[in-house]
Image (tube, rainbow, N blue to C red):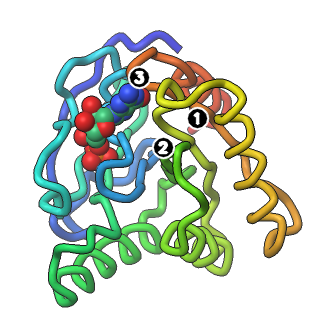
Amino acid sequence: MQIKTAIFVKSSGKWQECPEPEIPEYAFIGRSNVGKSSLINAMMNHKDLAKTSQTPGKTQLINHFLVNENWYLTDLPGYGYAKVSKSLRKDFEKLITNYILNRKNLVNLFVLIDIRHTPQKIDLEFMEWCGENGVPFSIVFTKLDKLKPGAADRNVEIYKAKLLETWEELPDIYITSAEKKVGGEEILKFVEKTNDY
Ligand code: GDP
């Protein structure tokens, strides 16, 4: 998919404040610092559409971007930042879960995972929750360029094996580097294929 236009629409502090759900929507989520803003910017061919390297945990808003005038790309707040207070974490959780469960036009959620890390409880639990609630999601490994190819492949295999302990089937998996502009096109292909409103 060629990106002709990518425009910031609005930030919402509640799912009810999000733009009218009249076109398909694809949301990106992951732990703070996973590389979400960088990947969004790389995919959109934009230097600073999504803000990179903000104070982790500070972005508590849902950001909507209108792409090619026919779908929304949604940047969800990062989860799992240890330094925010418990009550703030609860607020994040509520914002994210309410959004996911209520957003009628949400086609798919892209769950970002740093390819360097072993499977983390918080990500596995989040995906488990998606499964329990029938929320379609894919996994997007980030920062591929930070590992040698062999190590990256190994980590992906470890992750798959971990998922297969609880899942019968694996979700779609994308392997990306915002730095090297790898993998974004596959995500956009998926959007193109499923965006048939
Ligand atoms: P966010 O908090 O998930 O939005 O993460 P950011 O996009 O702000 O990225 C966090 C840090 O990881 C920044 O220092 C980025 O420069 C770095 N980063 C993000 N993506 C990549 C990548 O693909 N390769 C490398 N080498 N660094 C990355």
**Mark positioned earlier in the residue sequence (2 or 3):** 2
- Per the image, label 3 sits on a secondary structure element best described as helix
Q: Is residue 31 above or below residue 85?
A: above
Identify the mark at residue 24; answer none if there is no mark: 2
Give the residue displayed 15% in from the left and 84% down from the top: 85
Residue tagged 1: 195
Cβ atoms under marks 3 and 1 closer than 8 Å: no
Q: Position of residue 69 (x, y in %)?
A: 34, 25
Cβ atoms under marks 2 and 1 closer than 8 Å: yes
Q: Is residue 39 above or below residue 34?
A: above
- Per the image, label 2 sits on a secondary structure element best described as loop
Q: Is residue 25 above or below residue 178?
A: below
Residue tagged 3: 43
Give the residue displayed 48% in from the left and 46% down from the top: 114
Front residue of 184 and 123: 123
In terms of image quadrants, where is residue 98? bottom left
Q: Position of residue 41 (x, y in %)?
A: 30, 26
Within 10 Å of the Cα at label 3, are there few (<14), some (14-19), or many (20+) other Cα atoms?
Answer: many
In terms of image quadrants, where is residue 13? bottom left
**Mark positioned earlier in the residue sequence (2 or 1):** 2
Q: Is residue 113 above or below residue 103?
A: above
Q: Amino acid at mark 2?
A: Pro
Give how far apart the Cα atoms at labels 2 and 1 are.
6 Å
Front residue of 151 and 179: 151
Image quadrant occupied by the C terminus? top right
Query: Assess mark 1: CB under 8 A from ligand 1?
Result: no
- Per the image, label 1 sits on a secondary structure element best described as loop
Within 10 Å of the Cα at label 2, are there few (<14), some (14-19), or many (20+) other Cα atoms?
Answer: some
Q: Amino acid at mark 3?
A: Met
